[in-house]
Image (cartoon, grey):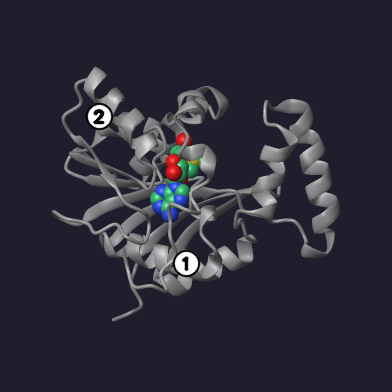
Amino acid sequence: MGPGWTIDEKRHAGTEHLDPEEVARFDEKMPFDPSVEIDVLREFGLSREDTVIDFGTGTGVFPLAVAKHCDRVVAVDVSETMLNAVEEKIEDRRMRNVETVHDGFLSYDHSGGPASFAFSKDALHHLPDFWKIEALKNVGNTLEAGGIFRLRDFVFSFDPQDSRTEIESWLEEKNRSTIFTDEELYVHFREEYSTYGFVLEALLERAGFEILEATYEDDFYAAYICRWVDCSE
Ligand SMILES: C[S@@+](CC[C@H](N)C(=O)[O-])C[C@H]1O[C@@H](n2cnc3c(N)ncnc32)[C@H](O)[C@@H]1O
């Protein structure tokens, strides 16, 4: 825990990520094929000697898959319930190079050699923008100079003038094509902190990352490849 003015990351983690019944359904509800992401890291030089840290790991789909391609994987999440699910998978598959750490983006304190890669998918939007940049600085500080950060998240790239119509039509489309309830979809806008791509790009750069690639998908999702250059020195 930090000083009294520090945000409580667990309180912002999303109640569904703390609830055992919801976590048990997570892989079915949010299916994710990690192979594309592993290919991206390999393209940027991932090798068997590397350490990879996954922030907001959820049920550990990414760390368990990337472990075959590197030396050490650290799966970080603020939800103990999520980490219990990861630990069960580690035990079932007898994986020896994946460790879990119960911490948040902000409180994670890396030990061991610096990582060459950091990864985060669908987790950073749980923090408000001031705290996003604090989180990004902490992610960067776990990396060696030149280390790579792959970030994927719900990020808006529609014109702010069109926000209401864009969001209404996104909700309508999701409502038809997914198993999420209206309330689950609304919470994302009402209580979480997805932001615009132009804001997130500035946050990444001011935290000390150079953005090598930024990809915007369907106005509601983005993926970045960044290199840690650390502008604090
Ligand atoms: C939507 S899930 C994504 C899980 C996984 N990355 C995936 O894509 O399958 C978001 C995860 O981020 C975690 N989370 C939320 N806020 C966090 C924080 N401040 N630090 C670390 N993890 C956080 C939640 O507990 C949850 O496991």
Report the residue at 26% width, 45% height from top. 101
Residue 54, position as x, y percentages in the image:
35, 45
Q: Is residue 127 left or right of residue 89?
A: right
Query: In the rendered structure, which disc, 2 or 1, sits on the residue that comes first in sequence?
Result: 2
**Quadrant location of the C terminus in the rendered image:** bottom left
Q: CA distance from mark 2 to mark 1?
A: 32 Å
Q: Up-down: is 1 above or below 37?
A: below
Name the image quarter holding residue 77.
Answer: top left
The picture quadrant for ligand 1 comes to: top left
Residue 156, position as x, y percentages in the image:
67, 55
Q: Nearer the viewer, residue 190 or 67?
A: 190
Callout 2 crowding tier (Cα within 10 Å): few <14, some 14–19, many ≥20: some
Report the residue at 56% width, 64% height from top. 200
For disc 2, the marked residue is 68
For disc 1, the marked residue is 131
Q: Nearer the viewer, residue 229 or 54?
A: 54
Q: Is residue 181 left or right of residue 79?
A: right
Where residue 36 is drawn, which disc sits there? none
Report the residue at 29% width, 57% height from top. 108
Q: Secondary structure at mark 2?
A: helix
Q: Is residue 41 left or right of residue 109?
A: right
Report the residue at 46% width, 30% height from top. 23
Q: Label 1 amino acid?
A: Trp
